[in-house]
Amino acid sequence: MKPRGILMTEHRLIERMIVIIQKEIAEIERGRQIDKFTINPIIDFMRFYADQTHHGKEENILFRQLAKKEMTEEDSKLMAELIDEHKFARTATEDIINAEEKFFKGQNTIGIIITTFNSLVRLYPRHIQKEDDIFFPNSETYLTDEELEAMVTKFEDFDRTMIHKKYKSLIEQFEE
Ligand SMILES: [Fe+2]
Ligand SMILES: [Fe+2]
């Protein structure tokens, strides 16, 4: 598999989470209580899988290598746009975490939670489509077969460290 195959497989899982988020928002809008047992695993997925594991490989490995290449102005612009969208998603996830914390302290932050989840639902399909259909295919024109192969190994090494990072941070959270 090429690097983009790995990233596209991850996109399919993120898309499934977006459907789950849409259903969750609909339930909350219908008046069901905010439920920690649903929101927390969603946030965990957005943080550790979508951001740290997926965006992590895109930014730290693929984009970093592409930054060394002479890309067209259009592709450079697109890459900057994708990085901005990652930032947006990261901030939105943190905003949901803060709003949830306030909610359980008694503040009415349901509106913020719904609006912010909705912004993620709007962002991801567009973001993923830009990568799958335009940026990833274009990016391969700048990389040799050897570079693509080496990138797959880097992706695998990156993924291998994630589970350890995740559970180390869990322990640190408990210790705080
Ligand atoms: Fe991305
Ligand atoms: Fe992506």
Image: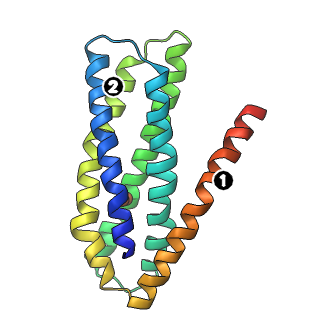
Which one is in front, 2 or 85? 2
Residue at the limit of the structure toward the front, as seen here: 1
Residue 133 spot, x, y in % from top left: 21, 67
| Residue at x-position 73% and y-position 39% | 171
Q: Quadrant of ligand 2?
A: bottom left
Q: Determine the secondary structure under disc 2.
A: helix
User: For this view, does 21 lie left or right of residue 146?
Assistant: left
Residue 114 spot, x, y in % from top left: 33, 25
Question: Which one is closest to the eye, mark 2 or mark 1?
Answer: 1
Residue 116 spot, x, y in % from top left: 36, 32
Q: Is residue 51 above or below residue 138?
A: above
* Amino acid type assigned to the residue bearing label 2 in the image: Ile
Judging by the rendered image, the residue that carries numbered circle 1 is 164
Residue 105 spot, x, y in % from top left: 56, 12
Residue at the limit of the structure toward the right, as seen here: 175
* Amino acid type assigned to the residue bearing label 1 in the image: His
| Residue at x-position 47% and y-position 78% | 151
| Residue at x-position 33% and y-position 55% | 11
For the C terminus, give its image quadrant. Answer: top right
Judging by the rendered image, the residue that carries numbered circle 2 is 114
Look at the numbered discs 2 and 1 and tell me whether their residues touch, using CB distance below 8 Å. no
| Residue at x-position 32% and y-position 18% | 28
Asked if residue 144 can be seen in this view, the reply is: no
The quadrant holding residue 167 is top right
Asked if residue 152 can be seen in this view, the reply is: yes
Q: Determine the secondary structure under disc 1.
A: helix
Going from the N terminus, do you reach mark 2 or mark 1 first? 2
